Structures are given as C-alpha cells and as structure tokens.
Amino acid sequence: MTRLTRHFAAIVLWVICVWMPNPAVGDHGADDRAFRILVIHSYSQQYPWTARQHEGFVAAITVGLDAPAEIKTEYLDTKRRALSAVYADAFAEHLKIKYASYDPDAVYVTDDSGLNFALHHLRHVFPDTPVFFSGVNDFSHLERLDAGAVTGVFEKKEIRPNLDLLHQLQGDAEQVVVIGDGSATYQAIEVELKRELHGAARPAVTFLISERLEDILDSLRNTPDQPVILTTLGAIRNQTGDVATLAQIVGGIVNAGRRIVISMEDAYLFDGVLDGYVTSGIAQG
C-alpha cells in the first residue's frame, strides 16, 4: 500500500506540473481557470469498485490543483456489454459528437476496458490529451504505453499472501477454488495469478470461471468444504441473464457450503467473507 501511495503521489505531481495549463496563455483564458477532466469508467459509478476508484481520484486530484476541477463522467458499461470493435467505434463517435466543442486537459480511465478504449479509440477523439488510469490488470500494457502521454496505477491481485493466510486459518488445504467471471479483466488477472503460482506444489488451485451464477453455485455445492478465493465477479449474470448484484453473487457463494471465503478485492467484503490481502479502489483512484 505504501508503494502504491508513493506512486500515485508521483502521478498527481506529474499531472499538475506537466498538464496544468498556464492560465495566462492556456486555451481557456485567464477568466476560465477550470481544469477540465473527462472521466471514462469501464463500469457504472453505481458499481462499488468504480465508485471507490472515482472517490479516490476526485479527492486526490483536487487537493493539488490551484484551479477548480471540472469533471465530466462517462462509462462504457462493460459489465453488461463487451467492448467489441463495433461498440467501441460507436462510443467514440458518440463522444466526438457530444464533446465537439470541449477540450479536456486530461482524461482519466479505469479498468482494462477503459484503458484499451483510450489507447485504441479515444486518441482519435482527443489526440493531444494526456491519459492517466487506475485499476488496470493487464501488465502487458507496460510494453506498449507511451510514457509521455499515458501513465497510471496497475492493480495486482496477489494470491500467495492469501494462500498463506488461508494456511494460518485452516492449516494445509489440499484444494482451493479461485472464482472469476471470465471477463477480459479476469483473464488478465488469471495470467498474473498463474505466474505467481508457477512451481507451487500445494495447495492445488482450481479456477472456477463462469459468467453464470447458477453454474458457479452448482459447482460449489458439489465441493462444500473447499475454501474459496474471490477475484473479480462483476460480470456474473443471474438466471434471467441480467448482471447480478454483488450482494446476490457473494451471498450465493457464501451460502453454497460451509467454507472459508476470502476476497482479493475490498468491494466484496459482505457477511461471510474474510478480508484477505485485498486491492483498494480508493487507494488506486
């Protein structure tokens, strides 16, 4: 957490020093000193993870600015709809029309879908606007980012400390179930988890991946005693095909057996879930 906080402080300083327009010569004139920020979230701000990211971002960025911040917010809703090329093109065109006369000083995006959209589509709408991000799990972006135009905070979910915690609570577990929703974000998380687990003999880790809540619960009922570690769950759907609430998802998992359930994310800390080594949305934002 300390390393993350230091890194974020450096980012804020960079934003203020490099991107803050000179009020005397800036595009907005001396009488209009608002620092314009366009926020594009991957998910609705009603989603707890996004709400925490946004809260942390707004609190931190406004502290260091000498000018008031003007923040406009959009979201891709990729928990409900995947970011296909067709959808991304249409959303970019929507922004191009909506913000035709708007010139943001910076763009802030959250999660992998937000960063992918910014890198491949938003650059055509605001080609000269710097981008910063948080909550991104795909570390392969590090090889492709233009450090002069894009910076931010990656989210790393660490499974080994949570397995160590589980050992302290339960002793040697032969099998541990890791649950995820199969989304693009989850896929990036799984790559990192498997890299961290490489070469580990015990415990055996089973990845239970589905976007259907009933499929996950049916599988858990067949193994009622195996401990569970939660990764990312927001794209899981209920029986009607709608995106389920986190309360429905986590509550169903908790009630599908007598087991230890550990979360790797602070947004999933409902009744029956243990606070393991979690990622913090507020700290990242």
Image: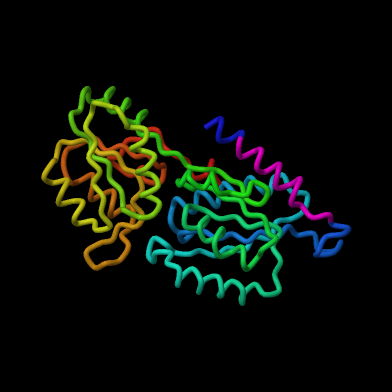
x then y, percent, for residue 255: 20, 46
Magenta span dominant secondary structure = helix
Q: How many marks do you count on the picture?
A: 0
Residue placed at 31% from the left, 53% from the top? 182
x then y, percent, for residue 158: 39, 34
Residue placed at 41% from the left, 42% from the top? 266
Give the camera-side residue of 16 and 124: 124
| Image: 25 above or below 167 | below
Q: In the rendered image, which quarter is residue 38 located in?
A: bottom right
Q: Is residue 138 left or right of residue 200?
A: right
Q: Is residue 143 magenta?
A: no
Q: In the rendered image, which quarter is residue 106 located in?
A: bottom right
Give the camera-side residue of 48 and 96: 96
Residue placed at 54% from the left, 41% from the top? 283
Q: Is residue 244 left or right of residue 77?
A: left
x then y, percent, for residue 275: 36, 35
x then y, percent, for residue 124: 62, 67
Give the camera-side residue of 234 and 117: 117
Q: Is residue 29 left or right of residue 240?
A: right
Which portion, as a residue range, is magenta?
7-22
Judged from this view, the residue extending furthest toward the right is 24
Judged from this view, the residue extending furthest toward the left is 222
